[in-house]
Structures are given as C-alpha cells and as structure tokens.
Amino acid sequence: MRRVSLNGSNNSSAKTGQQAGESASKGPTRLSYALKQRTETLDPRIHAYRNDIADIALADRIALHHYVAPSMRQIGLPIANLQAEPSESSELGSQLLFGEGFALLEAEDGWAWGYGLHDHFVGFVRKEALVAPRDATHIVSAVSTLIDGSVPLYMGSRIAGTVDGDAFVMDSGSVPVQDIRPVDERVSDPVAGAEALVGAPYLLGGRSAAGIDCSGLVQLSLAMAGHRVQRDSDLQQATIGEMLADNAPLQRGDLVFFPKHVGLMVDGETLVHASGHNGKVCTEALADVVARIGKDHEQPVLARRRVAG
C-alpha cells in the first residue's frame, strides 16, 4: 500500500502546473489537487475512510491529508472475521471466506484495515488471515467441505488447483471434486443455495454454514448465481433488482424486506431466511413472518424486489 499526501481544495476544477501567464522561472512544477465536488456524507460501511486516511478512490469525494492506494491480498483462512474495530470484542460487521480478495489499506498491531473486494464492506481483519493473491479456478459449491478430511471450507470459498480423478488437488491438500465447480460456472436458482443452508445457526455478521445472518444468506445465495450484491439488508433493498408493485404475485427468488431483515421467497407463500427469532436458517410461511414483525412495526414489509436473470 502507498500513502499519498494531497492538497485538498473545494474549487470546481483541478489545476496542474503553472497558472496561465506565470513564468517558468519561478521554480519547478508543483502538482495541486482539487475535489470535483465538496466533501459529501459517505457510508463508512462501504467507503473506506477515517479521520486520518482514506482509500485513494475517495480522493475526489472527501478532503483529508492522506490517501492510500490499496494493496491486494486474499483470505488464507477458512473464515476471517471483519470487525468494526481492531479488537476481537468489537462488533462483527461481516466475514470473509477463503480465497476472497481484500484491499489492504493499513496494517498495525496485528490488524489489517481495508475492505472485501466482493462487496467493498470495510473493517479490520487479523493480519495473519491475509496471503498473497492467486487467481481462483474453482469455487466451493457444497454447504461445506474438508481439506484432507480435516480443515473446513465453506460455500463460496474460492480455490485454485487441478482435478485429479475424484479429488481436487490444491497446494494445501485436496477436497472431493463433487463439492466444487469451476469459478465461472453459475447456478440458475439462488434459492437452492439458501435452502441448502437450512438449519445453519444464526450469527449476526456471519456468512457461512458455521453461522450466518439474513443479509449474509441473501448475499451468498445470490453470489452463487453470479450476482454481486451489497452486504447489509438496507443496502440490498436500495440496490438489488427491481421493485415489485404491492399487488404483484410473489414468485421463487423474490426478496422481501422487513425492518432490519430480509428473506428469499421459496414460492409464492413461503420464505427462507436466517432468522434471529428462530436462531437458524429456516423456511416459514411469509404470512407468519409478517404477523410476527407486525407486532413491533407498523409497516412490517418495507419492499419486495425481483432479481432479473
């Protein structure tokens, strides 16, 4: 990573070199920098900035003294927790799976600050979770699998190696070939991935069969079908697919958004979701979920959206 110092300005356009009409004899060319627009309010969940530094991609959007060009890394553990602060006891914002990319902005005291490349979600991971990047050839398609029968890998993990009979051989060992698929192969039905995870324990911030939350289930299931979506349910509600009319019949794959919650429709009447109330991924009648949430919220359903293709 490379820290860059820039002189911020609120001018409407940048100026480089000498001002028109100035004599070159005044000294060497000095580069200056200006914001394209005034500093704006950014969402710290998906925009990497702090009081002291920011991702260089934000240099035209927020005024700070230092910007950092990220270094690309990859997750080398089965699961890496993405914490809100550099502490194991801080809020678990999300998780990164084996082989997923990480943009490293700063490393200090054993922690790495940056964001996941698949969704730009910002946080801190333990530095030892990061390895040099390597292009993946396959992705784990089973709910979970084991390297040499002992080390777990979870659905969505990205791996590199070669097929040798019934085994997929990696540098670190092998997994059954039946548990993986080529990285560029997509399933057509994202709900199938969510249904496969029924019974997985609920974990706020989780993204795997070892523990998963509602928006993590939606993100992972859609990712297996080739859709890159945001991490949290409010971000998903604002960006996924197209809004459905209130009277439009629901169908398999439609998303229903509630206050701080989301699920996928199995059919026109049944929802699959990671339920904090039930403590696990489960299927329920949509009407029952609406009635339960309606006890605490005047508007239990915030939106219904459909993903094309």
Image (tube, rainbow, N blue to C red):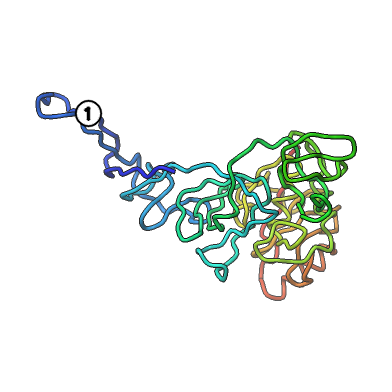
Three-letter amino acid code at disc 1? Gly
Q: Is residue 62 above or below residue 262?
A: above
Occupied quadrant, residue 259 = bottom right
Q: Which residue is drawn at the image coordinates 75% and 44% (left, top)?
A: 224
Observer-nearest of 134 and 273: 134
The percent coordinates of residue 227 (x first, y second) are: 70, 42
Q: Secondary structure at mark 1?
A: loop
Query: Would you say 268 lies left or right of 65 here?
Result: right
The percent coordinates of residue 201 (x first, y second) are: 77, 66
Observer-nearest of 61 and 114: 114
| Mark 1 crowd level (few <14, some 14–19, many ≥20, 10 Å Cα) | few
The percent coordinates of residue 257 (x first, y second) are: 69, 58
Query: Would you say 75 lies left or right of 66 here?
Result: right
* Residue 123 visible in the picture: yes
Q: Could you tell me how many numbered marks the image carries?
A: 1
Occupied quadrant, residue 93 = bottom right
Query: Would you say 238 lies left or right of 273 here?
Result: left
Q: Which residue is drawn at the image coordinates 13% and 24% (left, top)?
A: 24
Q: Which residue is drawn at the image coordinates 55% and 69% (left, top)?
A: 90
Query: Would you say 16 lies left or right of 61 here?
Result: left
* Quadrant where the image shows the C terminus: top right
Q: Which residue is drawn at the image coordinates 66% and 71% (left, top)?
A: 297
* Residue 251 visible in the picture: no
* Quadrant where the image shows the N terminus: top left
Mark 1 — residue? 17
Occupied quadrant, residue 21 = top left
Residue furthest bottom as drawn: 295
